[in-house]
Amino acid sequence: MTTREELHQLVDELPEDQAELARGWLQDLRDAADEDGPPLDSEALASLDRGLADLAAGRVKPLAEYERERGL
């Protein structure tokens, strides 16, 4: 399976509330890949991989819940 196919599979498996969050992250990643912008180093890419794994495993919470827990 190619990386793109794996990404598509991960996205297809996301619950709707997490899909919106993932969309924003992927847009940010796409925008960071701008040819005029700085390249992503291996540490940044590893961090993204960990975040996507957490998202796929359901180890995330909605922003509203996070803010409520922290009194924001």
Image (cartoon, helix red, strand yellow):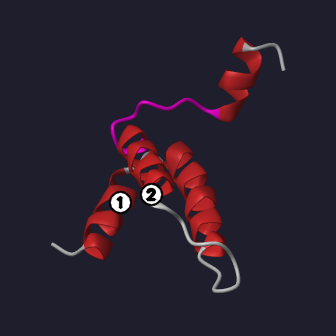
Q: Secondary structure at mark 1?
A: helix
Q: What's the amino acid at mark 2?
A: Leu
Task: Please indicate whether residue 68 sits to the left or right of residue 17 in the image.
Answer: right
- For the residue pair 15 and 25, the one nearer the viewer reads as 25
Q: Up-down: is 19 above or below 58?
A: below
Q: What's the amino acid at mark 1?
A: Asp
Q: Going by the picture, which residue comes out furthest to the right?
A: 72
The residue located at (59%, 73%) in the rendering is 30
Q: Is residue 8 magenta?
A: no
Q: Which residues are magenta?
A: 55-62
- For the residue pair 31 and 67, the one nearer the viewer reads as 31
- How far apart marks 1 and 2 lie (CA) works out to 21 Å
Q: Which secondary structure dominates the residues rendered in magenta?
A: loop
Q: Going by the picture, which residue comes out furthest to the bottom?
A: 35
Q: Which circle marks residue 12 in the picture? A: 1
Q: Secondary structure at mark 2?
A: helix
Residue 26 placement: quadrant: bottom right
- x, y percent for residue 55: 43, 42
The residue located at (32%, 74%) in the rendering is 4
- x, y percent for residue 52: 42, 49
Residue 31 placement: quadrant: bottom right
Q: Which circle marks residue 45 in the picture? A: 2
